[in-house]
Amino acid sequence: EIQLQESGPGLVKPSQSLSLTCSVTGYTITSGYDWSWIRKFPGNKMEWMGYISNSGSTNYNPSLKIRISITRDTSKNQFFLQLNSVTTEDTATYYCAGLNYGFDYWGQGVMVTVSS
Amino acid sequence: DIQMTQSPSLLSASVGDRVTLSCKASQNIYKYLNWYQQKLGEAPKLLIYYTNSLQTGIPSRFSGSGSGTDYTLTISSLQPEDVATYFCQQYNSWPTFGAGTKLELK
């Protein structure tokens, strides 16, 4: 069974960087799928942030392109999100997900608050 | 980016009702449309992909249809466990989501 689990700090200060890890079990991230980050804002709006493919290429939401980086560690079967220069508007629940035709597999999500 | 508009935002229905949720895209998305169910405190679950393909393990009372800019998720006979928020998502360009329809029991 494929499982994803997000981890990282729940509180980040404005102007700092947000860093999250997604650990994948039950599947090797180089075997298939595109490994995505998605966030859900207070009020329910969801935003796809970007993905790293199983081959290691990346694709980002144009609205985040200058602030976002998604990387991976294949030896640990993990992929990572870094979002720079955060503001209070980046407060959201962050999910990692495996993308095929749809987002087939999701982590439980981690709530991140941006506040001083 | 492609805007997705879902209606209604809130829907009350009774057990056994046929329920229809709508999703409209701001431009033609050529059936690249998925539906998700999210229950309170849980991650979203993929129900339908490419407009009308049922994800493995999803009950057959869920079905999808549509083309062009207009898409529909139908629950043929509402069950208590179907109480959730339902999101549509297009992938004709980078993925974007609708704001969701919250489905509650009357």
Image (spheres, helix red, strand yellow):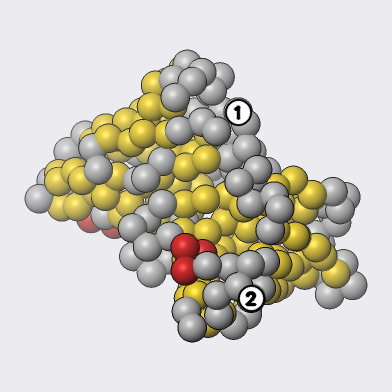
Task: Answer few, some or many: residues within 10 Å of disc 2's Cα (few below 14, many 20 plus, some between 14 and 19).
Answer: few
**Residue at the outermost left position:** B106
The residue lying toward the viewer, choosing from B93 and B15, is: B93
Helix, strand or loop under label 1: loop
Q: Quick one: SS at disc 2?
A: loop
Disc 1 crowd rating (10 Å Cα; few below 14, some 14-19, many 20+) is some
Q: Which residue is mark 1?
A: B92
Q: Is residue A32 above or below residue A8?
A: above
- Label 2: which residue? A16
Q: Is residue B40 left or right of residue A10?
A: left
Place of residue B57 in the rendered image (x, y in percent of width and height, measured from the top left): 51, 49
Q: Position of residue B59 (x, y in %)?
A: 41, 44
Q: Quadrant of residue B73?
A: top left
| Residue that appears at 26% across and 50% down | B102
| Left or right relative to B26: residue A27 | right
Tell me the distance, in whole angstroms, between the alpha carbons under discs 2 and 1: 33 Å
- Above or below, B8 against A105 in this view is above
Image quadrant assignment for residue A15: bottom right
Camera-side residue of A6 and A42: A42
Q: Amino acid at mark 1?
A: Asn
Q: Residue at x 49, y 83 (%)?
A: A116
Q: Are marks 2 and 1 on the same chain?
A: no
The chain carrying label 1 is B
Q: Residue at x 51, y 31 (%)?
A: B2
